[in-house]
Amino acid sequence: MLKINKLHKSYPIGDSSLHVLKGIDLSVDSGEMVAIMGSSGSGKSTLLNIIGMLDEADEGEYILDNVPIKNLTEKKAAIYRNKFLGFIFQSFNLINYKNALDNVALPLYYQGLKRKERIEKGLFHLEKVGLKAWAEHLPNELSGGQKQRVAIARALAADPKLLLADEPTGALDTKTSYEIMAFLQQLNDEGKTILIVTHEEDIADMCKRIVRLVDGVIMEDKFVEQVRASQYV
Amino acid sequence: MKFLFERDTWQEVYDSLSKNVLRTALTMVGVWWGILLLIGLLGSAKGIENSFNRLFGSFATNSVFVWGQSTSKPFKGFQEGKQVVLTLSDAKKVEENVDGIEFVVPRNQNQGVVTRNFLSGNFGVNGDYPLLDRVQKKKMIHGRFINQSDIDDNKKVVVISEEIYKQLFEKDAEMIGEYIQINSINFKVIGMFENGNVNMGPSSDIHIPFTTFQQIYNQGNDIGWVMITGKPDADITQIEADAKLMLKNLHRIHPEDDRAFGSFNLGKEFAKITGFLTGMQFLTWFVGIATLIAGVFAIGNILLITVKERTKEIGVRRALGATPFEIKRQIIVEAVFITLTAGLLGIISGGWILILIDTFLGQGDEAIFVNASVPIAVVFIALLILVVLGTLIGLIPAFKATSVKPIDALREE
């Protein structure tokens, strides 16, 4: 599904440069649910951004679904993102003047689908996250958990191969966090591959595999017994 | 271009613009004002030009009047102070030999006592050829102007102006076929014309055939003055100089004698005014387009701010798969939409202003603005310019929007 070899990334800071990722090797199979953990500055977000094609590595190899990802033009990156990836952000990043349905349908718009089809699919995914009744509501009329569910529905809308979640529970209280995690687990059970960046141990424990980053290298990579979030809800 | 007809494109435009109605409206003021100025001023300039043309419409403006005076230099044995009188043969020779001439119209005028029944008055009486009607169009209300057979047979017929009719006839009295006396000779009235708005030269109220005039005033072949009309593209100043030089030669007058012939160059005077009108139109275009450009820049400026505010949103869109082209296209559509809407509003309000001008200043014979209007082609050109300018100015925020990497855009708060 996803294969990373000897990935390096550094950012220039003034005259010197900050070496953020120092040779990452990572391979994720289809159907996995991986937590990428690390303290701030460990390079976990950078890794996620590179996987998400929002950033490009200086060195190394990145293959997604047998497609080598390199020398991307902005246009190509946009098309790949739309086709392969679904993003879930810490701060939801819904477009505040569009209602829930339009937000969910936005990736489909960029896929060039007809409006009728978009509404159909959008409603289908909203139903999946249990918010069909809220389709016409604007984001500011929704609670944090509801917003994140709309965002998940949006990430799912284009039927991506890989879901990328950057601290998906970072802005939510514990109870809501577990609800979201329960939902992500359910999606994983259905076969979606999910990558979650987090620094919360309890969230990481709800994944099937934990990858720990310290100062740009992988210190630990282990498969764990998944804690089901549904038991807390 | 399919995207232009998709509901979503316009939904996006609507969403983005309606987020801040006041700002959008203020942005549009610049372009609206520019177009309003352009339409209003161009229409007014056209109105003035029209009123001008109406004033001189019946008059061949590319003309010069020449008459004899007295010499100021001795030449070939003649003392200075010799009286110079033009003759019919002079007129003929000028017409035949000077380049660029359309007509040479010999004219005569004298005072006459004009009487009908018990009413009488002292008026200028003109002896004229039918040709006069070609260069100084008479708007006939009744009857006709002098024709060639009147000339050939020295007929005692007269064409009068409406003004003379009012002075000599009772209200609504029949005048065609009636007789009036000029210097106690009976003349049959054959036509009446409307008084023009402008009179060039001496009063032009009573016209009798040139040949009849020669007879009753015992004028011989002498003529009072000639009206020389140049062809539409001929240089009337050159014609004046050539004609005068030739006349000086014919009358044995010193070539540098400036006072032997008097003249009035209507073409030259007219050119000054039309030049002024052309200048005014140029100024209008200049001011209008300059204002327009300033307005379009204001739109670009506001869009730049909007794009800055929407950096994060644009980042999200790109993370969801919007290509840079799609982002740029959307912003350019917004720019063109604002410019065009503002432009259309400007055209409409400019049109209203022209209607107001026409209603309050454009009615009646004395109106300064006649049919103040702008050709539809100009309106379309203006719209085209707006589309082009809108696209160009939209390019700046469009490129600004996609110059930020999506990852940086997403970090923006």
Image (cartoon, coloured by chain):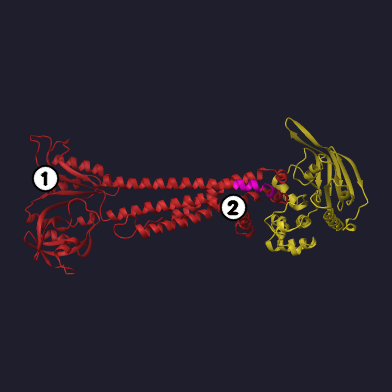
Chain colours: A yellow, B red
Mark linked to residue B412: none
Give the camera-side residue of B235 and B349: B349
Give the camera-side residue of B358 and A189: B358
Q: Where is residue A131 in the image (x, y as percent from the top left)?
A: 77, 62
Q: Name the residue under label 2.
A: B334
- In the visual, does B55 lie left or right of B360? left
Q: What stretch is highlighted in magenta?
A: B303-313
Marks 1/2: CA–CA distance: 76 Å
Residue A105: image quadrant is bottom right
- Disc 1 element: loop
Q: Nearer the viewer, mark 1 or mark 2?
A: 2
Chain letter behind tag 2: B
Chain letter behind tag 1: B
Q: Residues within 10 Å of mark 1 (few under 14, many from 20)?
A: some
The type of residue carrying mark 2 is Glu
Residue B141 seen from this side:
yes
Q: Where is residue A146 in the image (x, y as percent from the top left)?
A: 77, 58
Q: Which residue is drawn at 16% across and 61% down?
A: B164
Q: Position of residue B78 (x, y in %)?
A: 8, 36
Q: Residue at x 34, y 52 (%)?
A: B49
Q: Do the residues labelled 1 and 2 touch (CB within 8 Å)?
A: no
Dominant secondary structure of the residues highlighted in magenta in the image: helix
Say whether disc 1 or disc 2 marks the residue closer to the N-terminus: 1
Q: Residues within 10 Å of mark 2 (few under 14, many from 20)?
A: many
Q: Name the residue under label 1.
A: B85
